[in-house]
Image (tube, rainbow, N blue to C red):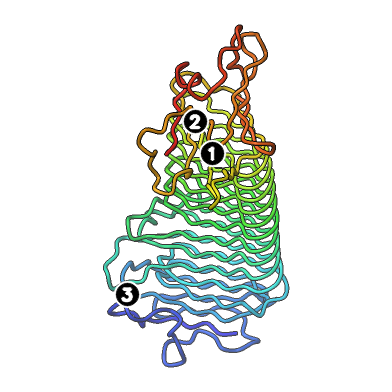
């Protein structure tokens, strides 16, 4: 066990990890107990050798006040050091680590159920300083909580929770400036992760995770498992990965890829782009003019409020056969002003001049059937024997919607590009 304090960072190149025996050594004895105070630092270890406390008498926001602690299987409290390096990777039992008022540093713990609490304090930044705080909690069911002491918007975060069912919360950290990044990797396990008001990057990893991006334009990934992901406010990008996920965009113009599995996707408020992927998905655009694509599988697509576009991906084989990737999709609330987009039919991405909707339908054998004979019945668009789109509630009393042209004349936009 050792405790070292001092200053290595005078021009942005040093850090607490560079402290060695040439700096002030407060303790190197495994059996040290009691306390010592020198040069503005106070260090103490309780008689049971279970708790290390190191406190600087005054916080200095620039290049001084660094502490390095190497100790295993002991709780650690550190306060008022700008730069902190705590190495407890050899710990096998769970330990508590508390760091108060740090601007940058590292905390590394080992196996066991650890509790790591860090409050950040930063007073500015220049290009020379690397204001990054890294936390690696190793294996175990760990709790990691990072908060804002006064102003943490100049400190970046990189958190690796490791294996285990971890709880990570950085929701009280200040929104970062344009150069600040906040990255969280949950690792394997059923993790609960809550982001900050910055633009966070959060990866849930394997198993069933609960992720809330909070504010900012976040990038959120569920990985494998049945995940619950909410973007919060901001223009978020969400990838459910594999598994049956619940994906909520929240406020903002979000992009959501459900991935593989039977997923539920809700865009929320904003002009969202929602993609179902493989599996039987339920996709609700919410409020706003959304683009909705079910992908492979038998999907339920709901536009909700706004003039939405329902996108269906097609391709043409060399012998002129139409390949669809829709399955049997069900659109619950299509209405006048909304669009059915049959994409990628033509290699050029443009409709061939002179080709009408009737030509298109007859060439590929597309049928439209409105045979309910009642207002509010279903209209079914069929693409051969294996793929179809059901337009719920669009039927007419006289069964008059029997072609793509009829649909377009009724106010449904048909886009072949």
- In which quadrant of the rendered view does residue 178 lie? bottom left
Q: Position of residue 224 (x, y in %)?
A: 67, 57
Q: Nearer the viewer, residue 411 or 316?
A: 316
Q: Nearer the viewer, residue 142 or 354?
A: 354
Q: CA distance from mark 1 to mark 2?
A: 8 Å
**Where is mark 2, residue-wise?**
340
- Which residue corresponds to the image point at 68% horizontal and 40% vertical from the top-left? 280
Q: Nearer the viewer, mark 3 or mark 1?
A: 1
Residue 380 vs 218, above or below: the answer is above
Q: Position of residue 190 (x, y in %)?
A: 70, 55
**Where is mark 3, residue-wise?**
63
- Which residue corresponds to the image point at 57% horizontal and 22% vertical from the top-left? 333
**Where is mark 1, residue-wise?**
312
Question: Quick one: SS at disc 2?
Answer: strand
Q: Position of residue 3 (x, y in %)?
A: 52, 82
* Marks 1,2: beta carbons within 8 A: yes
- Which label number is shown at residue 154? none
Residue 402 vs 16, above or below: the answer is above
Q: Nearer the viewer, residue 243 or 342?
A: 342
- Which residue corresponds to the image point at 66% horizontal and 58% vertical from the top-left? 166
Q: Position of residue 383 (x, y in %)?
A: 61, 35
């Amino acid at each position: 066990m050792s405790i070292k304090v001092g200053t290595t960072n005078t021009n942005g190149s040093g850090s607490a990890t560079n402290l060695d025996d040439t700096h002030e050594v407060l303790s190197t004895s495994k059996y040290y107990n009691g306390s010592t105070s020198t040069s503005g630092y106070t260090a103490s270890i309780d008689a049971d050798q279970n708790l290390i406390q190191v406190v600087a008498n005054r916080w200095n926001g620039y290049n001084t006040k660094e502490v390095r602690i190497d100790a295993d299987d002991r709780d650690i409290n550190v306060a008022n050091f700008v730069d902190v390096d705590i190495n407890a990777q050899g710990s096998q039992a769970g330990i508590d680590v508390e760091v108060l008022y740090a601007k940058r540093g590292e905390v590394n713990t080992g196996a066991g159920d650890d509790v790591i609490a860090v409050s950040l304090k930063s007073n500015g930044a220049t290009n020379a300083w690397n204001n990054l705080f890294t936390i690696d909690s190793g294996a175990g069911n760990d709790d990691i909580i990072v908060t804002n002491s006064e102003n943490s918007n100049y400190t970046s975060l990189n958190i690796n929770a490791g294996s285990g069912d971890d709880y990570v919360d950085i929701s009280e950290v200040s929104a970062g400036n344009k150069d600040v990044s906040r990255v969280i990797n949950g690792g394997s396990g059923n993790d609960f992760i809550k982001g900050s008001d910055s633009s966070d990057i959060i990866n849930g990893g394997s198993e069933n995770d609960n992720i809330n991006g909070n504010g900012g334009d976040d990038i959120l990934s569920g990985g494998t498992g049945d995940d619950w992901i909410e973007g919060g406010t901001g223009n978020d990008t969400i990838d459910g990965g594999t598994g049956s996920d619940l994906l909520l965009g929240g406020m903002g113009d979000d992009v959501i890829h459900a991935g593989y599995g039977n997923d539920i996707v809700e865009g929320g408020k904003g002009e969202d782009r929602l993609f179902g992927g493989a599996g039987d998905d339920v996709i609700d655009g919410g409020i706003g003019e959304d683009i909705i694509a079910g992908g492979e599988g038998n999907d339920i697509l709901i536009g909700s409020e706004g003039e939405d576009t329902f996108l269906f991906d097609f391709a043409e084989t060399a012998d002129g056969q139409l390949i669809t990737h829709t399955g049997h999709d069900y659109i619950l609330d299509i209405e006048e002003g909304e669009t059915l987009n049959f994409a990628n039919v033509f290699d050029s991405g443009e409709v061939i001049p002179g080709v009408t909707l009737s030509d298109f339908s007859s060439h590929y054998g597309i049928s439209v059937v409105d045979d309910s004979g009642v207002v509010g019945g279903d209209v079914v668009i069929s693409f051969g024997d294996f793929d179809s789109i059901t337009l719920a509630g669009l039927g007419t009393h006289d069964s008059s919607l029997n072609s793509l042209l009829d649909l377009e004349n009724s106010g449904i936009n048909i886009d072949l590009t």
